[in-house]
Image (cartoon, rainbow, N blue to C red):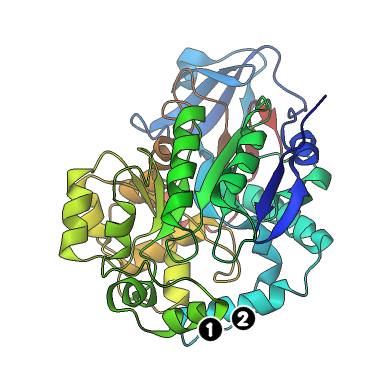
Amino acid sequence: MATTIVFVHAGAAFRADFFLRACFVGFTGRTLSTVKTLRSKYVLPMSSPAIEDGAVLLEGNKIMGVGRWADLKTPDAIDLGESILMPGLINAHCHLDYTCLRGTILPPESFASWILRINDIKRTLTDDDYLASVQQGLEESLRAGTTTILNIESFPEILLNLKRPTPRVWWFLELLDIRSRFGTEELVVGALSLLDQPADWLGGPGLSPHAPFTTSLALYRLAAECASLRQVPVMTHLAETQEEFDLFVHGRGPLHDFLAKLGRDMTDLDGQSPVARLFQPGVLPKGAILTHMNVLTESDWDLLAARVDDFSVVHCPRCHSYFGRPEFPIHRFLESGINLCLGTDSLASNWSLDLFAEMRHLREIHPSLPSESVLHMVTRAAAKAIGQEGLLGEIAPGAHADLIALPMSGPMENLHAAAIEITAPPHWVMVNGVDVG
């Protein structure tokens, strides 16, 4: 007899078994069944120097070689013309559930007021609204050249009716217990039931303890144990706002007052920073993805320096500007050697899911950043964060055939800078060896 395990999110229960049938499905489509070559005016592999009049050799859904067209041409080649052929981009932090909230929330006076506003709107939305939102977000991301998405999924039950996504998606199941009627073990047991199934679709599952102010240390530890045993990634929001810092360090502020009204138990506020809180033994697994990391003390930087290889950090440039936050210490992160990626966050605090727009905005704020470093954040760095080094984010033998072609005209002196500054969307996209437009 099959056992049905109930997974709980924000006090709402759903049956894990029907979500499994929805999520763990194979992508079907027209794949390349023979060896073929893609030719482009320029190839930008990311893991090796750019190539003029370049070519990429494919077999099925894998890249077999990259080099000059003269060396790799085949009779049935696909000529992409005056293009920059490069790896598909990787959005390292996104909330597809909230694509439908674009333009609905003006920049708030406080983070707590933004949470209050988004919660008010969410109460008016149905499962069908969220389903349409996820589908719209997937399509918008793909049009903008994003072929892999690390998505925080707050309502996984809706995915039963989702069309099979074309991009690779890691669905990070959001875990909160601030007001849950269920215990921490029940929450993680429900998540475990999802992870037991074979992941025969593009991407996979993950876990996302939401943030220190909404998720208990007990739940963080159980999620870390689960993730380590099952070899799935973990992502969390951390050190996002001064309000979060004031909550934990000083026991005051708008976020403190908001959570107190919700009935959050405040006895755990011991003066530690949010980073110090989560850097206790057993709370975060090695490889955890830390989103935001905006408000750090010197002691926090010391903690990071001691574990520089243990974590990846995600910065969301336009979300950062939307909230009017102080300048992100991007140069310090890069100099420290921490793996740094970019994400869009949600359209409740952004205007699009376009990573090229994120890169251009980042360059406007930090004009001294090398273009190659910025592109690295949405390709190889993001691939490393999700444990896909050598498979995603680069054009190299053995990597997945996830590719995009950017339209161009005229000579290119700096391909990395040119790729970022091209505002027209990719005119050709391939995911897993399938030409999707």
Q: Which residue is at 71% across, 67% downward?
A: 100
Quadrant of the image for the N terminus? top right
Any mark on residue 286, and which? none
Q: Dot 2 corresponds to which residue?
A: 117
Q: Dot 1 corresponds to which residue?
A: 113
Residue nearest the observer in this picture, 248 or 359: 248
Badge 1 vs badge 2, beta-carbon distance below 8 Å: yes
> On the rendered structure, is 337 left or right of 433?
left
- Coordinates of residue 9 in the picture (x, y in percent): 65, 56
Q: How many marks?
A: 2
Residue nearest the observer in this picture, 78 or 248: 248
Helix, strand or loop under label 1: helix
**Crowdedness near tag 1: few (<14), some (14–19) or many (≥20) residues, C-alpha within 10 Å:** some
**Which residue type carries mark 1?**
Ser
- Coordinates of residue 110 in the picture (x, y in percent): 46, 84
Helix, strand or loop under label 2: helix
* 231 relative to 91, above or below: above
